[in-house]
Image: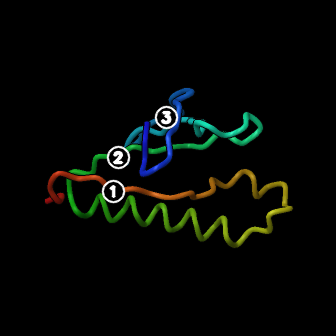
Amino acid sequence: VTIGSRSFERVRELGSGSFGVVWEVIEKGLESSKPALALKKTSPAKQEMLEACLLEAEVLQQLADMLPADLASARCVPRYEAHCTLATKPPQ
């Protein structure tokens, strides 16, 4: 899977929900000690779903930013990396 200039290898499916499928991925070209990431692929059918997906990403970013990095439980909160929106036509 390639997003922007970054390439990822799928490890396994973590789950799926109303926003799409979530995959455990490893970024290609990085040392193996780097943590795995969760990558979500969504296909929102409506503008409201797209906005909800983007809100989820924003909330994850805010949660991660509020926790001290040295706090052990901070590793339990998904860390938002980036998002990429690809669409052939805008959702209705």
Q: Is residue 55 left or right of residue 31?
A: left
Q: Amino acid at mark 2?
A: Thr
Q: Calculate the distance from the C-alpha at mark 2 to the C-alpha at mark 3.
A: 12 Å
Above or below: residue 31 compared with residue 70? above
Image location of residue 24, percent across then percent down: 56, 35
User: Which color scheme is applied?
Assistant: rainbow
Give the structural element (helix, strand or loop) at label 2: loop
Residue 6 in percent (x, y) is at 50, 46
SS class, disc 3: strand
Q: Is residue 9 left or right of residue 45?
A: right
Image disc number at residue 15: 3
Q: Which disc, if any, is residue 42?
A: 2
Residue corresponding to mark 1: 85
Query: Residue 50 occupies which quadrant of the picture?
Result: bottom left
| Residue 2 percent coordinates (x, y) | 43, 41
Circle 2 residues within 10 Å: few <14, some 14–19, many ≥20? some
Residue 26 appears at what percent x and percent y? 60, 36
Q: Earlier in the sequence, mark 1 or mark 2?
A: 2
**Looking at the image, which residue is at 86% across and 62% down?**
70
